[in-house]
């Protein structure tokens, strides 16, 4: 079955360490997105990529980095520069032609 | 002011009640999504619509493009409907980015 896989589901890291969250899709979608969700708040866009080897900053890109070397994969690195990294991170992909959107199951990152 | 506003923010209902969640937006859109997020965090797309009305089981979604308003209705609500319901719009600028409402937390009591 096609879908988006995010791993791991839960992640714990020490303050000051970089951490990479995985997002893989087998839907053949061109566009992929990373969102952050904090308690009681709506989803906020971190980065997005509409084609391979190209990506754009979203609304809250500071302290994050991404790569898009393959169509299927869009990993997100939370760097030590991100001041408040503890949050729930959601990856999504879309196909522009029919506005369809698919979400992953999310990664809950806790920095201690 | 947020570009996508949902009301109410929180909703508690008794099992069997008819539920309505509203979404108003201030931007031009190509499509609107209603999403469901369960406590585990994963998000499921319930509906995507750009006009009229869609129905799936006990769920009904409507949109009025002229009034920039959409509603999600749940008939004969059940405790398993308890979740966060999120309205998100796909802007007409066609960048592919969704603009999200803040979500409506629904609790259905038995």
Image: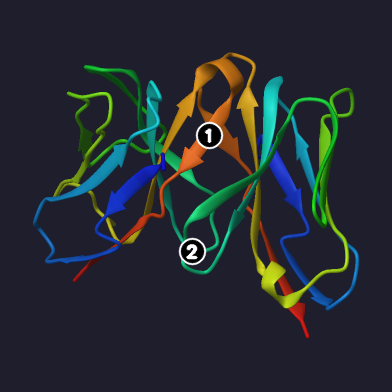
Numbered disc 2: secondary structure:
loop
Q: Earlier in the sequence, mark 1 or mark 2?
A: 2
Numbered disc 1: secondary structure:
strand
What's the distance in space between the residues labelled 1 and 2, CA to CA? 23 Å
Foreground residue among B80 and B106: B80
Q: Which residue is mark 2?
A: A39
Foreground residue among A93 and A109: A93
Q: Quadrant of residue B69?
A: top right
Q: Is residue B38 left or right of residue B89?
A: left
Q: Position of residue A25 (x, y in %)?
A: 33, 36
What residue is at 52 percent from the left and 69 percent from the top? B39
Q: Chain of mark 1?
A: A
Residue at the bottom extreme, as displayed: B110
Q: Are marks 1 and 2 on the same chain?
A: yes
Foreground residue among A84 and A38: A38
Q: Is residue A34 left or right of residue B45?
A: left
Q: Quadrant of residue A32?
A: top left
Q: Position of residue A96 (x, y in %)?
A: 52, 18
**Other residues around mark 1 within 10 Å, as few (<14) / some (14–19) / many (≥20):** many
Q: Which residue is mark 1?
A: A101
* Residue B54 higher or lower than B39, as above or below: above
What residue is at 40 percent from the left and 25 percent from the top? A29
Q: Position of residue B20 (x, y in %)?
A: 86, 56
What residue is at 89 percent from the left and 23 percent from the top? B66
Q: Is residue A68 left or right of residue B53?
A: left
On residue B80, which mark appears? none
* Residue A99 higher or lower than B2, as above or below: above
**Other residues around mark 2 within 10 Å, as few (<14) / some (14–19) / many (≥20):** few
């Amino acid at each position: 079955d096609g879908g988006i896989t995010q791993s791991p589901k839960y992640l714990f890291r020490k303050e000051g360490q970089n951490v990479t969250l995985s997002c893989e899709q087998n839907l053949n979608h061109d566009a992929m997105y990373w969102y952050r969700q904090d308690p009681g708040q709506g989803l906020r866009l971190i980065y997005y990529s509409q084609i391979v080897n190209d990506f754009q900053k979203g609304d809250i890109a500071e302290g994050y980095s991404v790569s898009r070397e393959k169509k299927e994969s869009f990993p997100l690195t939370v760097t030590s520069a991100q001041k408040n990294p503890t949050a729930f991170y959601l990856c999504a992909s879309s196909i522009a032609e029919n506005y369809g959107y698919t979400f992953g199951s999310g990664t809950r990152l806790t920095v201690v | 002011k947020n570009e996508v506003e949902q009301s109410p923010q929180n909703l508690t209902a008794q099992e069997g009640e008819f539920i309505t969640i509203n979404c108003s937006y201030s931007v031009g859109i190509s499509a609107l999504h209603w999403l469901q997020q369960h406590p585990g965090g994963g998000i499921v797309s319930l509906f995507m619509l750009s006009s009229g009305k869609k129905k799936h089981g006990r769920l009904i979604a409507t949109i009025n493009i002229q009034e920039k308003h959409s509603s999600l209705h749940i008939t004969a609500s059940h405790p398993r409907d308890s979740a966060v319901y999120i309205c998100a719009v796909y802007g007409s600028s066609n960048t592919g980015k969704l603009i999200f409402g803040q979500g409506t937390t629904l609790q259905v009591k038995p």
